[in-house]
Image (cartoon, helix red, strand yellow):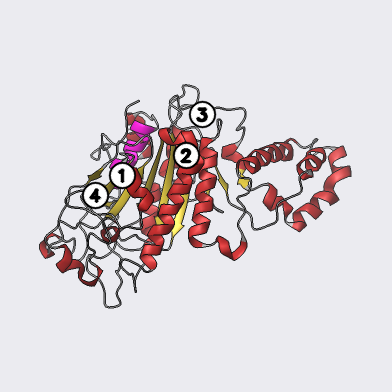
């Protein structure tokens, strides 16, 4: 700190911090987002990726019901759906009707659905299940749990000089999600509840910070992120739930579509723990589906032309029981459904090795049996979409999973 800075600005800076304006001006935890205007993407194709974590265990049998399974209605009971609630995607599977945008993407060959998909986790704790999904641990008995995120390891494994793999990432969250924890190339952004600052405040702060390199650079990055997210403040209580997710999705789209923006964004949508009164055509789960669908639509709109080179992956930590419980809900299960959409996706299909819902087919006599590992999908994202070499993915990002190769054919060849 120089004498000039200490003499002229210390009291002023304290007043700014006390007023809370600093929080609204510097919404990005900046290490991973430094230099938007100075460093272009290292991915030669310019491809982008958004990872949407559905926290709380989404009921995949309600999202993508296997209408053609002979045991479906008997097993699901009061939670079974018909084609009016979940119109057919193909002969065997439907999609809940609240997913109007997702259905449009599917019909345009821009979306595909995974079913009977799960991480290696086989217990039923939300916390441990989310940790397993976000770390990408091998999940074998006796192997230590990884403590950093699979996307963080991918970022650190990329070769920026050679232009191989993703360069930077942003989490649209107040705190860094585990998926990105451990990377110096990742930052966070979240909308502010505070009023928008006056138009000339950045200029005044620039004069105030001109002799402090750290604060000067932070202000420069805050100015860039503020320009990208103009008008996306959180409007008090109205900004909860589905509206909050749409705001986050718009922000992610603006970051990803910027010429020198990040390659990866991570978003979260909670509220999937439907133990009671889950509903069918309407109810709490249908509202969750609608919130996710609207957020994905907002993300596409914000991406603009960048949609054609973007992939969006939506996964949950585990599924829910195949049978309803006594309160019209479902309990913690194992396998679920997932969605992959975007202009870079070779969609219009269901990707599933369907295990069936008969009593003999269920995992531990209660859950949809997993037949597809999330790790195979995550590897495909890194290798076939973001360009990280397969040997690096196996050795540095998903150690101990060489027996689970990337799932091929998920992305369009350009």
Say which element carries label 4: loop
Query: In screen coordinates, is 214 left or right of 243?
Result: right
- Check disc 4: other Cα within 10 Å, few if <14, some if 14-19, many if 20+: many
Residue 348's place in the image compared with 197, above or below, is above
Is residue 45 among what the camera can see?
yes
Q: Earlier in the sequence, mark 2 or mark 1?
A: 1
Residue stretch in magenta:
374-385
Label 2 to label 3: alpha-carbon separation: 11 Å
Looking at the rendering, which quadrant does residue 383 occupy? top left
Which one is in front in this view, the residue at disc 2 or the one at disc 4? Answer: 4
Say which element carries label 1: helix
Front residue (pair 137, 232): 232
Q: Position of residue 140 (x, y in %)?
A: 27, 50
Q: Give the residue number, with chain letter if any, for mark 1.
A: 106
Label 3 to label 1: alpha-carbon separation: 29 Å
Are circles 2 and 3 on residues that touch, CB within 8 Å? no
Q: Give the residue number, with chain letter if any, for mark 4.
A: 89
Labelled disc at residue 173: none
Q: Earlier in the sequence, mark 2 or mark 4?
A: 4
Label 3 to label 4: alpha-carbon separation: 36 Å
Q: Position of residue 223 (x, y in %)?
A: 68, 40
Q: Give the residue number, with chain letter if any, for mark 3.
A: 41
Task: Please tell me which residue is depicted at 69% across the width and 47% down the height of the picture.
Answer: 25
Q: Position of residue 115 (x, y in %)?
A: 25, 51
> Is 187 a magenta residue?
no
Q: Give the residue number, with chain letter if any, for mark 2.
A: 264
Are circles 2 and 4 on residues that touch, CB within 8 Å? no
Q: Earlier in the sequence, mark 3 or mark 4?
A: 3
């Amino acid at each position: 700190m120089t004498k000039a800075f200490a003499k002229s600005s210390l009291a002023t800076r304290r007043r700014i911090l006390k007023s809370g304006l600093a929080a609204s001006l510097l919404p990005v935890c900046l290490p991973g987002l430094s230099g938007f205007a100075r460093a272009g993407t290292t991915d030669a194709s310019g491809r982008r990726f958004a990872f949407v974590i559905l926290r709380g265990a989404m009921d995949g049998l309600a999202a993508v019901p296997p209408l053609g399974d002979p045991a479906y209605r008997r097993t699901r009971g009061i939670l079974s759906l018909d084609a009016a609630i979940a119109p057919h995607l193909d002969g065997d599977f439907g999609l809940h009707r609240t997913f109007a945008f997702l259905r449009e993407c599917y019909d345009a060959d821009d979306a595909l659905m995974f079913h009977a998909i799960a991480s290696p986790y086989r217990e039923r704790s939300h916390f441990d299940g989310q940790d397993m999904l976000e770390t990408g641990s091998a999940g074998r008995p006796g192997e230590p749990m990884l403590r950093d995120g699979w996307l963080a390891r991918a970022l650190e494994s990329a070769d920026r000089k050679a232009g191989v793999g993703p360069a930077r990432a942003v989490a649209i969250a107040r705190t860094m999600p585990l998926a990105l924890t451990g990377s110096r190339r990742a930052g966070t952004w979240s909308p502010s509840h505070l009023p928008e600052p006056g138009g000339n405040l950045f200029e005044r702060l620039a004069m105030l910070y001109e002799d402090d390199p750290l604060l000067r650079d932070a202000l420069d990055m805050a100015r860039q992120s503020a320009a990208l997210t103009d008008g996306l403040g959180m409007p008090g209580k109205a900004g909860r739930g589905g509206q909050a997710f749409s705001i986050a999705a718009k922000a992610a789209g603006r970051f990803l579509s910027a010429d020198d923006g990040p390659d990866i964004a991570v978003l979260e949508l909670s509220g999937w723990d439907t133990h009671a009164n889950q509903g069918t055509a309407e109810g709490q789960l249908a509202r969750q589906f609608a919130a996710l669908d609207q957020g994905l639509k907002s993300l596409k709109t914000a991406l603009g032309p960048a949609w054609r080179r973007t992939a969006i992956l939506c996964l949950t930590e585990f599924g829910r029981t195949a049978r309803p419980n006594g309160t019209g809900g479902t309990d913690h299960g194992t396998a679920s459904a997932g969605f992959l959409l975007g202009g870079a996706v070779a969609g219009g299909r269901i990707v599933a090795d369907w295990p069936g819902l008969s009593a003999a087919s269920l995992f531990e006599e209660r859950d949809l049996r997993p037949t597809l590992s999330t790790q195979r999908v995550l590897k495909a994202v890194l290798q076939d979409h973001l360009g990280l070499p397969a040997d690096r993915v196996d050795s540095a990002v998903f150690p101990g999973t060489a027996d689970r190769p990337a799932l091929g054919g998920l992305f369009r060849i350009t």
